[in-house]
Amino acid sequence: MDKSNDLDILQTYTWRKIREAYVKQAALVREVNNLVGPLILLSNSCNFYFTCLHLFLGITQGMSDTSLDQIYYLLSFTWLCIRTSLVVLSAADVNVCSKDSLPYLFKYNTQTYNLEIDRLQYQLRKDFVALSGMGFFFLTKSLLLQMGGAVVTYELVLIQFDSTDYNLTNTTAY
């Protein structure tokens, strides 16, 4: 028996088992996503709505003169932003972890490279593993920036369409 041939077979078998374990883990993430997808959608929608509402009311009604109200507004808005960010970032970790091993596979020794490693690389590159809000959005790190941009956009639109213009009452005497 040739020991190098046995070693090649053993390495191929090991990499096949690793690839199959990845496929099973990706299937598990998809199954969990199907079960908690409505909850993710509800949670992120409520966080987005309350962030917009809190910011809109703070801008249009202004913070009151008392320092206690100002501190409360700033602390509650900060807590809302931190909570939303941490929820999105912790769920986005699923997507980040699914891609973590790919750079190491590209650095793998070419002398012991085999078909199973190539298949695993292909699956890691092409397979998108992430939690989602029922398919409407995927929880990735870029979603946090998209939500921030959407909050700013909606706030500008809401401020423009706000029917109570506080500055017009002071300038009518001119």
Image (spheres, grey):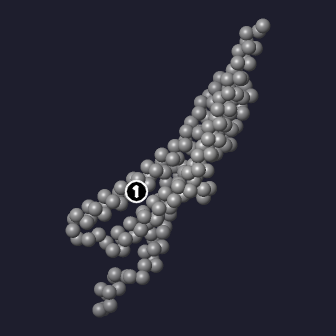
Residue ranking furthest to the front = 35
Q: Could you say which is closer to the camera, residue 173 or residue 68?
A: 68
Outermost residue toward the top?
Answer: 1
35 is higher (above) or lower (below) than 74: above
Residue 134 in which image quadrant: bottom right
* 117 to 49, vertically: above or below: above
* Residue 111 image offset from top left, x and y in percent: 70, 20
Position of residue 94 in the picture relative to residue 66 (left or right):
right
- Residue 112 is left or right of residue 40, and the answer is right
| Foreground pick, 11 / 135 | 135
Q: As shown in the figure, which amino acid type bears the numbered disc 1?
A: Cys
Identify the residue at image location x=31%, y=72%: 62
Q: Residue at x 77, y 9 (%)?
A: 2
| Residue 43 position in % (x across, y down) | 49, 57
**SS class, disc 1:** helix
Q: In the rendered image, which quarter is residue 63 located in?
A: bottom left
Considering only vertical position in the picture, is 23 above or below 63?
A: above
Is residue 172 visible in the rendered image? The answer is yes
Residue shown at 72%/18% (left/top)?
A: 8
- Counting from the top left corner in percent of width and height, residue 170 is at 30, 86
Q: Which residue is mark 1?
A: 81
On the question of residue 146 being in view, the answer is no
| Numbered label tally | 1
